[in-house]
Amino acid sequence: MIHKDIANMLLEQLNMELHSGYLYMEFANYYESENLPGFAHWYMVQAAEEYDHAMRIRNFLIGSGVKVTLKPIADTIKEYKDAKAPLVEGLKHEQMITASINRIYEKALSMKDYLTAEFLRWFITEQGEEETNAQQNIDKAELAGLSGSGLYMLDREMGARQG
Ligand code: OFO
């Protein structure tokens, strides 16, 4: 059984992961409305990954004897000034998620909860990748430009994301 404080932090993180998926689906909705199906596809794949992150936490909590209850998911921004704006929001969001994971990890270590700390190591590595991907998306958009053939080519590349 894990400590109640750690369980509560993980329940909060579970909600944040679901919110991440909700946010990225909203990005996808925006890109669909802008006729950028490749960007939309990239974020729908990302939304599915976030659901997987949430399920990892849910399963860990259940396996640790914690009763899982779900809270409402926070709302998202729905309008963006251009195709780069969601990418910038995405990086900010991932940095916030990283900070949250790190806080739980530090708390687990301080409470000598090595099982939770070990569980969180996967997320720490994953967050490194998530931030790298988010930054690369911004870099590519800056290189490609936000209109014309550059944007068209980038949209095709984004649409090739496998998983
Ligand atoms: Fe779950 O990694 Fe993004 O938010």
Image: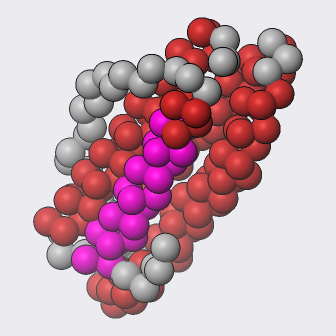
Q: Is residue 140 above or below residue 10?
A: below
Q: Is residue 79 above or below residue 145?
A: above
Q: Quadrant of residue 32?
A: bottom left
- Residue found 29% across the figure and 69% down from its top: 40
Residue 150 visible in the picture: no
Residue 75: image location, x then y, percent: 25, 32
Q: Is residue 1 left or right of residue 107?
A: left
Q: Is residue 88 left or right of residue 155?
A: right
| Count of numbered badges drawn on the protein | 0
Image quadrant for the N terminus? top right
- In the image, is residue 40 part of the stretch drawn in magenta? yes
Q: Quadrant of residue 150?
A: bottom left
* Frontmost residue, 65 versus 17: 65
* Frontmost residue, 118 versus 85: 118
Q: Is residue 24 above or below residue 148?
A: above
* Frontmost residue, 119 versus 16: 119
> Residue most toward the top?
4
Provide the residue span drawn in magenta: 37-58
Residue 159 visible in the picture: yes
Residue 44: image location, x then y, percent: 33, 64
- Residue found 43% across the figure and 85% down from its top: 160
Residue 33: image location, x then y, percent: 14, 65
* Magenta highlight: main SS: helix
- Residue found 58% across the figure and 33% down from its top: 63
* Frontmost residue, 96 versus 108: 108
Residue 133: image location, x then y, percent: 58, 63
- In the image, is residue 143 part of the stretch drawn in magenta? no
Q: Quadrant of residue 68?
A: top left
Q: How is the image coloured?
A: secondary structure
